[in-house]
Amino acid sequence: MFTTQEPLQLQPKERSRLEELARSTHSPAAWVRRAQVLLLLADRVAVRAIQTRTGMSPRRQRHWKEQWQKQGWKGLLDAPRPGRPKKVTAEKEAAILAATELSPTRPLTHWSTRRLARRTGVSHSTVMRVWHKAGIQPHRLER
């Protein structure tokens, strides 16, 4: 069976840390799988056998091996994903929470997400997320 041209060289300290990570039940599963693949590559196990054991394709095995060789431990981490940046800044969250603390105009007794959203200029979903993150339930606040 096919093995890699150049075997992965691991220092004893690196090997012990990878073995610890590979046995971990608290680390993310992707990290555990990558550690297992690196250990198998270091043991000169055939690429197809590694694929059978871990389910990782030869191409991905090569990718993680190269990442390890270039960056070490940082190479095992997930790369930041592209996407829209956050629109709600910490200041905006603070403004929403501060407005929540204020009493709404009479005869209202508490804020609804839609009412507070109109007042602060954000969507009601944003207000709901900020409240949930802060653990606030406006109908239970005492003023």
Image (spheres, rainbow, N blue to C red):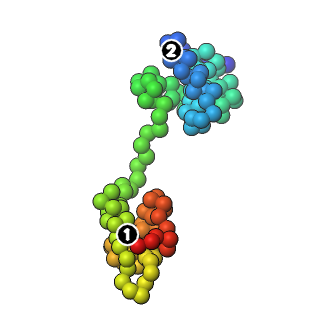
Q: Quadrant of residue 115?
A: bottom left
Q: Specify whether 4 is left or right of 73.
A: right
**Element type at marker 2?**
helix
Mark 1 neighbour class, 10 Å CA radius: few under 14, some 14 to 19, many 20 or more? some
> How far apart are labels 2 and 1 at the CA level?
53 Å
Of residues 17 and 104, the one drawn nearer to the viewer in this rendering = 104
Q: Specify whether 136 is left or right of 44.
A: left
**Element type at marker 1?**
helix
Residue 65 visible in the snapshot? yes
What is the residue that sits farthest to the left in this orientation? 91
Residue 37 visible in the snapshot? no
127 in relation to 59, above or below: below
Quarter of the rendering occupied by the C terminus: bottom left
Mark 2 neighbour class, 10 Å CA radius: few under 14, some 14 to 19, many 20 or more? few
Quarter of the rendering occupied by the N terminus: top right
87 in relation to 58, above or below: below
Of residues 94 and 18, the one drawn nearer to the viewer in this rendering = 94
55 in relation to 47, above or below: below
Please tell me which residue is depicted at 66% across the width and 31% down the height of the picture. Answer: 54
Q: Which residue is mark 2?
A: 13
Please tell me which residue is depicted at 37% across the width and 69% down the height of the picture. Answer: 101
Q: What is the three-letter code of the residue carrying label 1?
A: Glu
What is the residue that sits farthest to the top in this orientation? 12
Q: Which residue is mark 1?
A: 101
Q: What is the three-letter code of the residue carrying label 2?
A: Lys
Please tell me which residue is depicted at 39% across the width and 70% down the height of the picture. Answer: 100
- Residue 114 at what x, y percent from top left? 43, 77
Precedes in sequence: disc 2 or disc 1: 2
Q: Which mark is residue 73?
A: none
27 in relation to 143, above or below: above
What is the residue that sits farthest to the front in this orientation? 143
Mark nearest the camera among 2 and 1 is: 1
